[in-house]
Amino acid sequence: MQADLIIVGAGMVGSALALALKDSGLNILLLDSGTLTLKPFDPQSAFEPRVSALSMASQRILERLGAWDGILARRSSPYAEMQVWDGSGTGNIHFAASSVHAELLGHIVENRVIQDALLEALLASRVQLLPGASLEALQRTASGWQLRLADGRELHTPLLVAADGANSAVRRLAGCATREWDYLHHAIVTSVRCAQPHQRTAWQRFTDDGPLAFLPLARDGDQHWCSIVWSCVPQQAEHLMALDAAGFADELGKAFEQRLGAVLEVDPRLCIPLRQRHAKRYVEAGLALIGDAAHTIHPLAGQGVNLGFLDAGVLAEVLLHAQQRGERLAAERVLSRFERRRMPHNLAMMAAMESFERLFQATPPPLRWLRNAGLSLVNGLPEAKALFVRQALGLSGDLPALARV
Ligand SMILES: Cc1cc2nc3c(=O)[nH]c(=O)nc-3n(C[C@H](O)[C@H](O)[C@H](O)COP(=O)(O)OP(=O)(O)OC[C@H]3O[C@@H](n4cnc5c(N)ncnc54)[C@H](O)[C@@H]3O)c2cc1C
């Protein structure tokens, strides 16, 4: 089988890239080891533990790709405010969309909802989908790449895009170097029902062990459910995972200072080891890495997939421009334009998250004082806060046309 472009990984980011290029006239093959089938969505179903905080920039991209209506038709939770505070001090900061005359800061959406809405749009397009296709071997040829799947099928393409997630097989098989480090943290994720409504606010408490987030969920107008992301050291994660639901609810409520009252119900928990990884290069001739295949970032800012959607938007834009100019799309010179636009932005976001994480892990009193004073100081500076809010909306920097107003 031969295609002009093969995208490995039909996750959120790979699917977005395929949709952004669907009218390019390129013969695109999007393959995934999963089934790529659309199941009917039950609005009463339990929440999926993995959710994403989608920025306004991601919303715009998804609107233009024809997937946003599919998200709204399923389930999403808009939020307009954010409360962040230091659990071992007095520092706190409050962000509101209204400070930059915006209605919302973003939406919390279950990953499977985003995925299904993208798949729905893909099924209505001319993009060829190849489900049950697990990449096993990769070889450079005179005209590009030969891919071998686990079932023995062979595929050929001049241009390959890795969108196969944090443990990317493409990145490994192509021998792309990465820088990586453990956060020595695990994240426990689940959904919980609280005694008090979340008020369409994203809540984040920094504890001595790591950040704890309560992200607002909505089901039939009920505002009592939140998705939680609790980062903690492996030993504590092990202890928390071993507790029964009532014991976990109790500890969670205490760690969250009962800001939304008692935790009344807890869904099944997932524990995910956190690792930051960044590919040293995003491109080489005939190859580009996007989304988590190129970078994984601490979930504390909820930016992972937002960065991935921007990667997809910029790569599509670079390829469409090159096509208009009659350039060879697989040329490293062309693909480097994508790397030049995205790498500085992704690195800056990762560095910011890293310093934030370190600052809140710090125990020496001067640093504690600094972060408490810093949070409260920023809280009193409307211009500085507006800057943060614009950053959170994802509307600053070098945006692809898909994300612009
Ligand atoms: C605890 C936690 C909380 C998070 N919260 C947020 C948040 O609030 N906001 C946010 O923006 N981000 C968040 N993230 C990050 C976000 O989940 C990721 O950035 C996002 O899922 C990356 O999407 P992707 O499409 O690049 O990769 P993935 O979602 O991993 O998709 C990869 C796809 O490739 C396929 N695949 C893998 N290997 C192969 C192979 N060998 N052959 C064929 N197919 C293959 C897989 O089946 C999958 O469909 C969070 C992450 C964690 C761990």
Image (cartoon, rainbow, N blue to C red):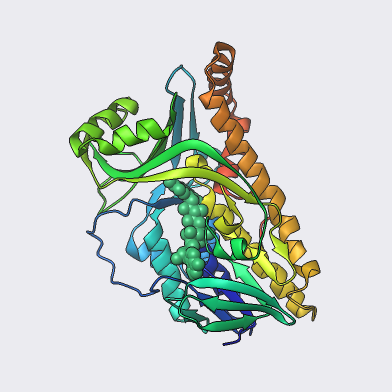
Examine the image and state in which quarter residue 328 appears. bottom right
> From this viewpoint, which residue is outermost toward the bottom?
1
Looking at the picture, does residue 176 appear above or below residue 376? below
Q: Is residue 28 something that shows in the picture?
A: yes
Q: Which is nearer the eye, 89 or 229?
A: 229
Which quadrant: the N terminus?
bottom right
Q: Percent from the top left, x then y, of residue 184? A: 49, 35
Q: Is residue 5 left or right of residue 82?
A: right
Residue drawn at 52 percent across, 59 percent down: 165
Using the rendered view, name the quadrant where residue 80 is placed: top left
Residue 120: give x, y in percent of width and height: 41, 74
Q: 351 and 272: which one is in front?
A: 272
Q: Is residue 165 left or right of residue 227?
A: right
> Which residue is at 38% across, 61% downward?
112
In the rendered structure, the answer to whether residue 4 lies left or right of residue 217 reads right
Residue 172 horizontal/vertical position (percent): 60, 61
The residue located at (58%, 82%) in the rendering is: 155
In the rendered image, residue 15, in percent from the top left (x then y), is placed at 51, 69
Q: Is residue 182 left or right of residue 4?
A: left
Q: Quick one: 124 or 184, which is closer to the camera?
A: 184
Q: Is residue 154 above or below residue 221?
A: below
Quadrant in which residue 269 is drawn: top left
In the rendered view of the protein, which quadrant contains the C terminus? bottom right
Placement of 160 over or under 24, stated as above or below: above
Asked if one can make out residue 401 in the rendered structure from this viewpoint, the answer is no
- How many labels, in total? 0
Q: Residue furthest top?
A: 365
In depth, the one of 374 and 378 nearer the eye is 374
